[in-house]
Image: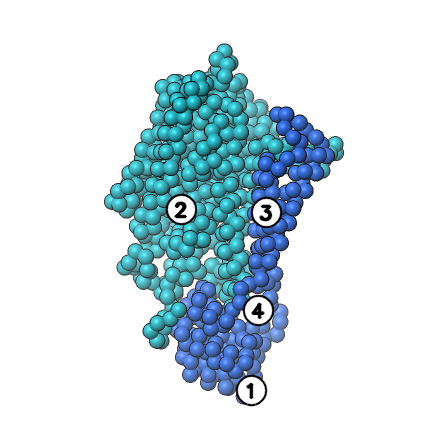
Chain colours: A blue, B cyan
Amino acid sequence: MRRPIAGVLGAFEHIDAACDAITALRAQGRSDFTVYSAAPSHDLEHALGIETSPVRLFTLIGGVTGVGAGIGMTFWMSLDWPLVTGGKAIATFPPFVVFMFELMVLLGSLATVAGIIILSLLRPTTGMAYDPRFSDDRIGIFVPCQGGEATRVEGMFKQAGAVEVRHAA
Amino acid sequence: MAAIAHDTVPTQTHHDVTRDVVNTLGTAGRGYMLLLGGAVALFLVGLVTFILLLKSGLGLAGYNPPVFWSVYITTFVFWIGIGHAGTLISAILFLFRSPWRNAIYRATEAMTVFAVMTAGLFPIIHIGRQWFFYWLLPYPNQRWLWPNFKSPLLWDVFAISTYLTVSTTFLCVGLVPDVAAARDLVRGWRSKVYGFFSLGWKGTDSQWRHYTRGYLYLAALATPLVLSVHSVVSWDFAMSIVPGWHGTIFAPYFVAGAIYSGLGMVLTLMIPLRKALHLEHMITEYHFDNIGKLALLTGCILFYAYGMEYFIAWYSGNTFEQTTFWRRAFGPMWWGGWTMIICNPFVSQLFWFKKIRRNLTALFVISIFVNIGMWFERYVIIVSSLQNDFVPWAWGQLTPTWADWGILAGSFGWFSMWFLLFARTFPVVAIQEVKEQIPMPRLRRGGH
């Protein structure tokens, strides 16, 4: 268990208030804060200036690997044990496209899930202050800071419209 | 409990959604336990039948020349088909940005997973020496023999196993934020269990950033997959030269039929489920109206496909095709042929009427007809074609036995058991996606 991180946690009921707080934090040059929400929101994404996730690279690599595995498996295994059926060619693309497609979808999906896990779920969130209401109906913003900086952040949260502000650790 | 005043825009708050859905979890009532007990009893009937099949062989199921594909393969295609509506609602409608799916997609996706789990048992039951089922897979065996990759049956192995894996993955990924919401609301040991399954989800901006993109790509991959799966299943038949099976329309015909049958099962499950879990304010007539419209669309495609099958049989001038389709309507299996014609294309035309699409009793009754009709469709296609092949002296009749019905009943028990357990254990309505439909309060007017 990681030690609690010192900082300020603000809870917001109104989304525009949370967006104002995020904009103010970014205007101060901060990017080390964390925003909690119960559902994804375009307003929050815009305020945060979020870029497209690299999880698509995992999907692409998984899909391409799947097609390659499909080609390799079908051609190699068919040629390794030649089985003439219906007078057709032993190794040929049309019937093998099914395997290439299915393996593309299978490995593409599994790689996507691996991407989600590696990029988001394996990132440590322990130690950061959290409130169970953030998975319900509140938006949370946690800013790691101490001393005078924490007091300034608290004032800024209250000015933006936070319904609750508390100091963590 | 806040009521929904309008069809499309919920008037609930985010907190209402979390509370109402999480309240569906936990202690079960007497009615639920009775249903679960019934499902387990049916499953045990299937299990005992399967043990007897293992002991005595497929002769018990009436497998005799010329019909070696009968109730088991029929039921396999039936359950695979059931799964398709779930993926349509969860993945395809997600890509089309149809927000009405949000309240019902979780239950339908769960239906998909359990239907495919059920379907996957049938090829194993059907193959005779069930303990050698792994011969279907390409694995490095002692003599380095590989399966025949030109066989549609092997295409099926890959299609079904991919479908099961991807559907399960899609369901589980969708569950993570909702399980985290349940973790934060319940107390005691249940909070710990949900905490374990939430994988440390806290809904941070970084988590949402990767999650939403990943979910989009999963939906994008599941969409062509669902269309491919029933196409591949249809090619199990269409790649052969058996009269009644060798049709080029089989892939779209089977896909439309699969979605139609799945929508029937969605209605059968969702109408009692919303009442039992007190979710009437979240799953409204508006949702059933839209499901009815989809069923109408797929029912009309089926109407066209049925008509075209008979027309092409006549127009081809091929005696064998003509005989097969004549016998489907007027031969010994006329009752099956007419059951599928009445229950599918004709009953689906009732969905033209808005009053019917919004009458839950009528929808429930229709859904039972759809389930029956779609099972008979597969039975008629499979059995009638095999009974009357090219050589009249080799023709024969299939009489299903108790072993067929025992396994069929067992499959319904197996499916219902998992669905009922799921409905009480995990959020059956997607909390996070319903919340996306509900605007968060603002201090100022306007917004994104």
State the residue at coordinates (35%, 55%). B282
Q: Distance between the residues labelled 4 and 2?
A: 38 Å
Badge 4: chain ID: A
- The three-letter code of the residue at mark 4 reads Thr
Badge 2: chain ID: B
Which is more foreground, mark 4 or mark 2? 4
Q: Do labels 1 and 4 share a chain?
A: yes
Counting residues from the N terminus, which is met first, the one under dot 4 or under dot 3? 3
Q: Residue A125 carries which label?
A: 4
- The three-letter code of the residue at mark 1 reads Gly
Residue highlighted by disc 1: A147
Q: Residue A104 carries which label?
A: 3
State the residue at coordinates (33%, 60%). B10
State the residue at coordinates (38%, 26%). B311
Measured as percent of width and height from the top left, residue A43 is found at 43, 69
- The three-letter code of the residue at mark 2 reads Tyr
Q: Distance between the residues labelled 3 and 2?
A: 41 Å
Q: Residue B32 carries which label?
A: 2
Which is more foreground, mark 2 or mark 1? 1
| Label 4 SS | loop
Observer able to see residue B24: no
Q: In the figure, B294 relative to B209: above or below? A: above
| Label 3 SS | helix
- The three-letter code of the residue at mark 3 reads Met
Nearer to the camera, B429 or B36: B429
Tell me the quarter of the image containing the N terminus of chain B: bottom left
Which is more foreground, mark 4 or mark 3? 3
| Label 1 SS | helix
Badge 3: chain ID: A
State the residue at coordinates (46%, 42%). B83
Badge 1: chain ID: A
Q: Are marks 2 and 1 on the same chain?
A: no
